[in-house]
Image (spheres, rainbow, N blue to C red):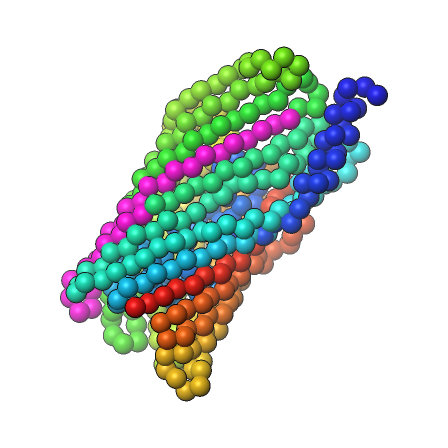
Amino acid sequence: MSEKRKRRYFFHGVMAVSLILFPATNLLAQSDVYFGHPLGSTNILGIYSPLASAAGETILSFPGPYTAFLNPASMTLTSGFNLAVSTRLSHAYARNDYNYDNQLMSYKRTTFYPEFAGLMAGNGKWRIALAYSLPEEYNRPKTLTYDNFEEQDGKLYNFGLSVARKITDKVSIGLSAAYRTGQINHTRYYDSSQENRYWDVDIHSCIFDFGLIWEVNQTVTLGLALRPPYKMTIKYYSYSELLETGDIINTQRIKSSYRFPLVLTASSRIKVLDNLSFFSDISYWDWSSSQTGRDPQLLSEIYTPNPGKDIVKFSGGLDYALKIQSNLENRLHILAGYINDTQIYRSLQGNRVANDYVTFGLGLELKKFQIGASARLPLAAVDEYGHIYSSRFQFGIGLTL
């Protein structure tokens, strides 16, 4: 048997083993062309609590340690000491590329990660929060691209501090700062040559968020959040390794940056009844101002190029709370929501759009203890060539003292 045929059978075996199940962050069609594609919606400010996710990823639905890094002023809508942790189960499916027999292949992937741990405390008119989160992960199974195989792993970590203060009985302001750091490792296995290609990418950035809350009356609360543009520093190193000798050739090393857009988010909370509330978020993403630093051709492998237009995203949701045993401190929350994100996702075949998502979940309040679970699913066909469809499931617990 020839050496090339041996490698072919080996890679077919690896491909079969790698077709495992994967649930992820969002249900949506996306291109898998770029290393830094998070397998979820591009336009997400950060981690939402499971209950807020179930209510359409709305900021004012459940204020606390999570929203300290979405709209920091929202912390003043709660009091006391708050502790929250959550995990994320992600599932993705793709009908990806063609094999040696010109058959369309598919793969599935399942990941399960802790995504958030944070605490919030208050003193008089002041609030402060600290948190760790995993806003993005870039893991990919080994997949076939015609005669080549590719695989990837990577994570982006977020460490943040947030402060807020009540200015009047109705108006509050807040500021949060976060440091993000992570790495993406990508490998391409060539079947038609005697070498493999490797990419090691380090990513770092500092992010700031400003927030304003106006409690108009007992029924209506409004919020405004601003995330200024920020630069992500990228250290890019790629090389090829000759399989026969182990020699390293064709090295490339650069340090550059990618400018992410300004984001402006207007939020509302309307309390219709004592046990029924509606929430909405409208966010504007200034993508037309995003920029790539030096060596844009290389950096375009990592993040999606400028989509060419600004994006307006809408999220809406509701919370229906049922008393348990006529006890005001014990409640069951029934949550549902809808998300419309008009981001254009690019693929090798052209632009494809996945606009709509549904969310739902349950929450249980037992005096000072909270439990929540949510799901986010796409309203889209799940069988387009060259796109990944991912769904997210969250589970979290909280404590308020």
> Which secondary structure is most common in the magenta stretch?
strand
Whether residue 109 can be seen here: yes
* Quadrant of residue 58 within the rendered picture: bottom left
Q: In which quadrant of the rendered image does the C terminus lie?
A: bottom left
* Residue under the image location 42 percent in, 77 percent down: 331
Whether residue 28 can be seen here: no
Residue 300 drawn above or below residue 72: above
Residue 216 is inside the magenta segment? no
Q: Which residues are magenta?
A: 160-189
Residue 58 drawn above or below residue 270: above
Q: Nearer the viewer, residue 256 or 181?
A: 181
x then y, percent, for residue 304: 49, 37
Residue 30 drawn above or below residue 213: above
* Residue under the image location 61 percent in, 27 percent down: 188
x then y, percent, for residue 235: 41, 27
* Residue under the image location 19 percent in, 60 percent down: 126
x then y, percent, for residue 256: 38, 26
